[in-house]
Amino acid sequence: MDDLLGRTLLRLARNAIGGHFGLPPQPVDESAQLQEWAATFVTLTRHGELRGCIGSLEAWRPLAEDVRSNALAAAFRDPRFPPLSAAELPHTRIEVSLLTPAEALSCRDEADALSKLRPHIDGVILSAGRHRATFLPQVWEQLPDPALFLAQLKRKAGLAASYWGPEVRLEHYTVRKWQEEEP
């Protein structure tokens, strides 16, 4: 079931992006699971480099709708990149991550937080006042050291890498992920 679900989610994402360019959709296996509310991220890479990544941290719509919407957002609305072109699509690899609900990670201070992070397992959400950011568990591949991982997450949230204050809140989650073969 897991492989079938993964293939279905990848096809939904590719169909959504391809539909933007007028490409005919590939058939998708419908299942009741696609109507359950879920949170996903869709990540696009081209030649091994990030090309877009947008997602939902909380389940608030059906899984199929979340994947389609996040695929379109990753391709055309990620502010870090220009919109994906039709010529890029055949060379773009899609990955879909299905998130578990986030849970608070209680910690006394930054050292305690670092000791509780599980590299290559946890996705992490950092919140501090109006600042908020997340890294999927896949980011551990580029940032395997917990201190560096957390420092870069703080930067992503718009904070100094060395910042720590009483309003810092951490949450963690895990993902099931599927990715297309390299084009």
Image (cartoon, grey):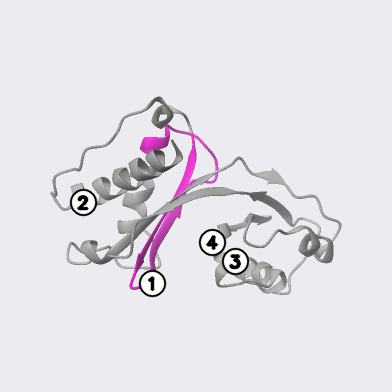
| Marks 1 and 3, how far apart at CA | 16 Å
* Numbered circle sitting on residue 140: 3
**Residue type for callout 4:** Gln
Q: Mark 4 = which residue?
A: 138
**Disc 2 residue type (three-letter):** Gly
Q: Which is more foreground, mark 1 or mark 2?
A: 1
Disc 3 residue type (three-letter): Trp
* C-alpha gap between disc 4 and disc 1: 13 Å
Q: Earlier in the sequence, mark 3 or mark 2?
A: 2
Query: Closer to the observer: label 2 or label 4?
Result: 4
Would you call the spot at circle 1 few (<14 residues within 10 Å), some (14-19), or many (20 or more)?
Answer: few
Magenta segment boundaries in residue numbering: 38-66
What's the amino acid at mark 1? Gly
Q: Quadrant of the N terminus?
A: top left
Which residue is the site of mark 1?
48
Distance (Cα) linking label 4 and label 3: 5 Å
